[in-house]
Amino acid sequence: MGRSSNRSRTPIRRKVRKKGSFFSEKLLRFSLITFVIVSFLGLAYHYREGLAYYFGFKSDKIRLEKAEAKRISDVRNYQILENHQGKAIGLDVSEFQGAINWTSVETIENSYPLEFMFIRATAGKDHIDGKFRENWLGAKKRKVIRGAYHYYRPNENSLEQAQLFIQTVRLEKGDLPPVLDIEKLPKEQSLLKLKLGLKRWLKAVEAHYKVKPIIYTSENYYDDFLKEEFSDYLFWIANYNFYREKIADDWLFWQFTEKATVAGIKGNVDVNIYNGDVEQLRYITVE
């Protein structure tokens, strides 16, 4: 074992900052920041009229663009409704519409009688729509034909989703068949497993209500993923494109807009056309 030796160490002198220097630097920094702020405010005040004009112009431009988009949408809505005279017209709503004044919900665009209403009941395996019960009863009091739909979440257990819908929705005579709303592709499962899950949901719900469900989706989703393999189901298709002027023969319902105005409902609302008149619509309801 070696011995430890005592070595003489030269003490290290630390440079001590003078207090006066520290406060001078702080004061200089504060002065620079104050100068920048005052200069900015001075420029803003000097050019206040120009800035007000610019931001006012931008604000007006955005407002006018929105107004023009709404006007074009309204024109299309009227054209579509005129092209489908005699067809049953209806809405679909959820908690996103907020509280609905059901006593005022009578017509679409103040012209076309409301014949049916789809109401979101559930989403995924654990969410009951916050306005479902209120809307479900409101549609009944309004004496419109009502239907309930489930928003399907890929990657969540399909049978648990079906069970939540079944526990939430009690269909009565005259109600529309249950609807499965599928809009998104899975992130954590294959397309094959998605389709298997959809089939399990559909079969479980059909076994409970003794009626075949309807499938809601977009036209692209329908063409690309569902049209062939789910051909024994009836479809409710969403397509808002201007090139589409008529409901397709193989569509049961067509959601043609998401920007309609309805008294009693705040904001925009979806409008749907049934491929038949109201008497034919009653024919597909629950017995």
Image (cartoon, grey):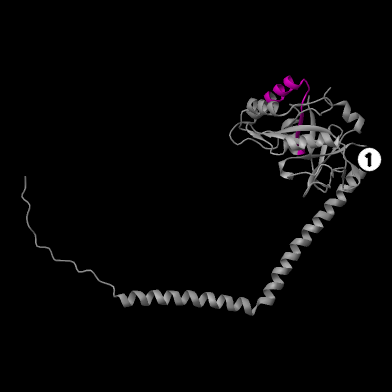
- Give the magenta-colored segment's residue range: 200-219
Q: Is residue 210 magenta?
A: yes
Q: Which residue is rendered at x = 80% and y = 55% of the image?
A: 69
Q: Which of the 4 image quarters holds residue 183?
A: top right
Q: What is the crowding at mark 1: few (fewer than 14 residues within 10 Å), some, or many (at least 20)?
A: few
Query: Residue 219, percent across and down?
Result: 77, 38
Task: Look at label 1 and name its amino acid.
Answer: Gln
Q: Is residue 158 magenta?
A: no
Q: Establish if 108 lies above or below 155.
A: below
Residue situated in front as seen by the camera: 240 or 192: 240
Residue situated in front as seen by the camera: 194 or 274: 274
Residue situated in front as seen by the camera: 281 or 113: 113
Q: Is residue 153 visible?
A: no
Query: What residue did someone put label 1 on?
Result: 85
Q: Which residue is rendered at x = 51% and y = 75% of the image?
A: 36
The quarter of the picture where the C terminus appears is top right
Residue at the farthest right position: 86
